[in-house]
Amino acid sequence: MDILGLQLSPRLGGNSDIMLSAFAEAAGETGLEVIKFSVAERRVEPCLGCASCDATGQCVITGDDMEELYPLLARARNIVVSTSLYFYDVPAKGKALIDRSQALWARRYVLNQKEMLKPDGRGFLLALGATRGKTSSPRSACPSNTSSTPWACPRPLKPSSSGSWRNRATWPGSRKC
């Protein structure tokens, strides 16, 4: 498997599912093998917060579909996460998957199990949200934004002349946090 695609929205056929399918199709056309795991089709129990995985690297919850996902996550070199945003956050089932992945984090960073290290691996995030036609104006979490004006992104990300992506906060005229 070259790419593991995680679809974190609870809706099959929704925008994030379509977006991940398009990504997987394009990757497949280049000869890469893509496995797709959708929380919409799976049962993922929420994390208990018991911290047992810090001692063992194994989650104490059994019998749900995370047992199928753990080996995929452990061997994946590249991971693509596709998610809708509900109230500016990942949907609950997707958050449960993220929280339950703590067992793999503990293996690598608490128990120092080197098989979790993928030095040439990459992660990608495909995220989208909408407001059903209404204007949304959340306040900025930026500490320098002390005014009562709504947050507005100064400019979208775009490739630099070298082909790499530049952070909009480094562009002239943009606010730095």
Image (cartoon, grey):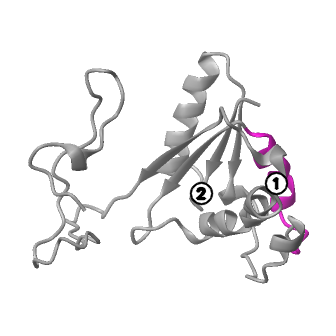
**Residue 50, image x, y percentages:** 79, 83
Label 2: few (<14), some (14–19) or many (≥20) C-alpha neighbours in 10 Å: many
As for residue 70 lying within the magenta part, the answer is yes
Residue visible at 60% across and 62% down in the picture: 10
Residue position for label 1: 70
Residue visible at 80% across and 53% down in the picture: 69
Residue position for label 2: 8
Asked if residue 35 is positioned above or below residue 154 in the image, the reply reads: above
Q: Amino acid at mark 2?
A: Leu
The nearer-to-camera label among 1 and 2 is: 1
- Cα–Cα gap, marks 1 and 2: 15 Å
Q: Amino acid at mark 1?
A: Tyr
Front-most of 27 and 132?
27
**Residue 100, image x, y percentages:** 73, 67
Label 1, secondary structure: give it.
Answer: helix
Quadrant in which residue 97 is drawn:
bottom right
Residue visible at 59% across and 25% down in the picture: 27
Which residues are drawn in magenta?
Answer: 60-76
Asked if residue 175 is positioned above or below residue 77 in the image, the reply reads: below
